Image: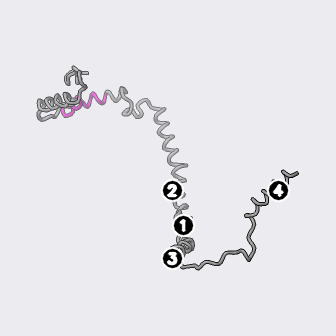
Amino acid sequence: RLLAVAGACVALLLVGPCFVPGPQAAPAPEVVTFNPALAASAALPVLTMLAEDAEAKYGDSRRWSAVLVPLTTLVIPAVAMGIFTIYVSSDDAFYQFRPGHPRGMREEKELYSNPLYAGRKNPMEGLVNKDDFEKGLDEAWERAKPKGSTVTVKDKLKE
């Protein structure tokens, strides 16, 4: 019993600060000074109500819908289906993008038979001074190669 009474007293002491004090114990009112920063921060929500929203208006979304809906539902699928149909129905479709395609190789052979394009794949074609280029390449390789490497530029180019 004594323990229960002691527990109740402790509980009352802990709950005491939760209640509002009576009028005779209220602190004296403080002198309030005007704070302009506080007044500006209080007026800020009112000022933001005057500004327009930073979002698309109803008319803008209708304008975009008039373009995007037909584009995404009619044009793009029709183009994709057309490309797929051409790809499936023709062996020569998009041969430019397939390395080793017979038609591409035939056209490449015809192109290189023309004297204007004969040396097009040769990287040394069109150099003004080939010896100067090879000398600079040797010097650059000597600076860039790993230590202890015996590989030369000519060997590397042959690979």
Which numbered marker is on residue 119?
none
**Mark 4 vs mark 2: which is more N-terminal?**
4
Please name the residue shown 54% across and 67% down the image: 53
**Mark 4 vs mark 1: which is more N-terminal?**
4
What distance separates the C-alpha of mark 4 from that of mark 3? 50 Å
Counting from the top left corner in percent of width and height, residue 102 is at 36, 26
Q: Does residue 82 sit above or below 50 in this rendering?
A: above
Badge 2 is on which residue? 67
The answer to whether residue 42 is magenta is: no
Please name the residue shown 61% across and 77% down the image: 30
What distance separates the C-alpha of mark 4 from that of mark 1? 58 Å
Nearest-to-viewer mark from 3 and 2: 3
Badge 3 is on which residue? 36
**Mark 4 vs mark 3: which is more N-terminal?**
4
Asked if residue 14 lies left or right of residue 111, the reply is right
Can you tell which quarter of the image residue 140 is in?
top left
Amino acid type shown at disc 1: Asp
Amino acid type shown at disc 3: Pro
Nearest-to-viewer mark from 4 and 3: 4
**Mark 1 vs mark 2: which is more N-terminal?**
1
Residues 8 and 88: in front is: 8
Nearest-to-viewer mark from 4 and 1: 4
What distance separates the C-alpha of mark 1 from that of mark 2? 24 Å
